[in-house]
Image (cartoon, rainbow, N blue to C red):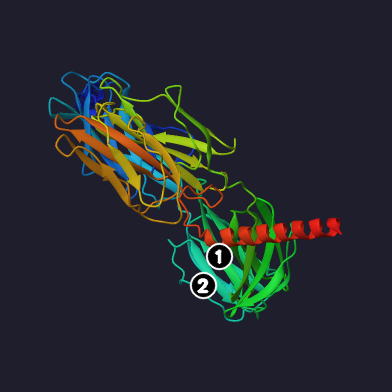
Amino acid sequence: MKKIYISVLIMFLLIIPLSVEAESSLTIECNSGNNIAGQTLTCKIKSSGDTAYNKLEGNIEVPSNTNVTFKANSGINGSISNNKLTITSTSNIDTEDLGTLQIIFASNTTGDNTIKLSNVKLFNNDEEVDRANDVSTIVNVKSTINTLSSLTLDDCNNCSLSPAFREDLTIYVVNTTSSQITFNAKANGNATVTGAGTKTLTNNSETFRITVTSEAGDSRVYSITVKRNLEKSSDNALKDLSIDKGDLELKESNGITSYNAIVDSDEVTITATANDNKATITGAGKKTLDYGKNEFTIIVTAEDGTSRSYLVVINRTDNRNANAYLKDLTINGEDIDFEKDIIEYEYFVGDDITELDIEAIPELDSSTVEIEGNKDFVDGENIVTITVKAEDGSEKIYTIVVIKGEVVKTDIYLDDLQIEGYDISFKQDNFDYTITIHDENILDITAIFDEDKYTVEIIGNEDLKDGSIIKIIVTDEDGNSSIYKIKIQKEASREITKTEDINYIPVIMSSALGLLVVLNAVQIVKKVRNK
């Protein structure tokens, strides 16, 4: 009977499942390719097994300073807090793909690194129903570190880096008297170094570059400029100085040494050659010349930095024309008795005139003409200027005084007009006169008129020049005026109209004496014939 009980017990135990020993299976599958520190790595978490559950909990183990988050698949919620992974669902989780781990390794991470999910428990309505196996994977991470841990110098007569070495400084200067130098460079992490080693110095200043390349392929360049402190030349003199158009002449003036030349050209090329081929020259080359004096400074700088200046003075001859006269001037197609030496004219217009049709022709085609003020005339006097500019820049200005709205009467006359020392042959109805005077600056003018009917004003009778115009304005009691104008000429070649005080006594006496001589000669001839 005892044997029967034992057999039944064994069969009962075989029928009851041992659920606490059963385990579901998890896997971690990370993406392939280059895993670089600082960049995101994705790993999928997959589940397999027959256990029904709606919650999973487990521990995530990653390298220190690694940032890890979890993104659950659709229909599932998941998160990581304090390296603990929790996945939940409102219904049983029956999908194989639970979600994705997103992992970012610290920048100093390198080599093989383990990602592990451990102590995984499965729950169904908060009751633990199963456990999953621990699972892990190994990821090789490539470092982005590309700095030097040290940089030292040898074989350069106790030279040193300036400034002192630091991993984050990439530009240095070295002063040495040696003809060679050795760079000893060591990189951080598994980065590689190129450009170090022993270098031969062939120039006074040379720059060497040491490149550090990280496992991820990022490069950093350290630049070291090596300067050789050799004795430098102080020769800052010129061996030759010349121009391509003419010859330079050495001159001394007020303690200043200069090289001078006169040329007839708008440009010149200065050539300078230094005594020492290590010296540098500035200021030479092709130069544009203005008319007259042009100064250029040639600077020679020696190898040691000292300099000397040479002054080159080039005078460009000015053969441009200086004629700034007008050849002709017409207003509204009318002849205004233009003379090139008369620079001021007067012109009357009606109330409806706002500008003039002026044709001003220069004597030379090379001159230019500019007219200003010939618009928007107002009542009274308006000044129009005609500027003639000659080729050499000199200019002459002609003026037209435009009188708008002023009525000039022809029946308002002077009784007489006299100028002391000059005869103008005055006529009442002649309003324009021209006289040639000596070098007076003012004339003694007498205007005779009916004082009960008129008033007289004399304008322009001061500081007289060739071309000046004197105006005698006669105004009646109603305000109407007439204007007599006297144009002044002051050239010695013109015929002087002033009456001269001639002493006729010597002329009369000479004539009488000559007559007596003739009569006496006649009497002598008669006597000879009678004999």
Nearer to me, 216 or 167: 167
Mark 1, residue position:
224
Circles 1 and 2, Cβ within 8 Å, touching? The answer is yes
Nearer to me, 337 or 175: 337
Q: Can residue 349 be seen in this view?
A: yes
* Left or right of 88 on screen, residue 436: right
Question: What distance separates the C-alpha of mark 1 from that of mark 2?
Answer: 8 Å
Regarding mark 1 in the picture, which secondary structure is present there? Answer: strand
Q: What residue type is labelled 1?
A: Ile
Residue 150 drawn above or below residue 99: below
Residue 31 drawn above or below residue 208: above
Q: Position of residue 115 (x, y in %)?
A: 36, 42
* Viewport quadrant of the N terminus: top left
Q: Position of residue 130 (x, y in %)?
A: 23, 29
Mark 2, residue position:
161
Q: Say which label, 1 or 2, has the lower sequence index.
A: 2
Q: Position of residue 507 (x, y in %)?
A: 58, 59
Q: Quadrant of residue 312?
A: bottom right
Q: Where is residue 189 in the image (x, y as percent from the top left)?
A: 48, 57
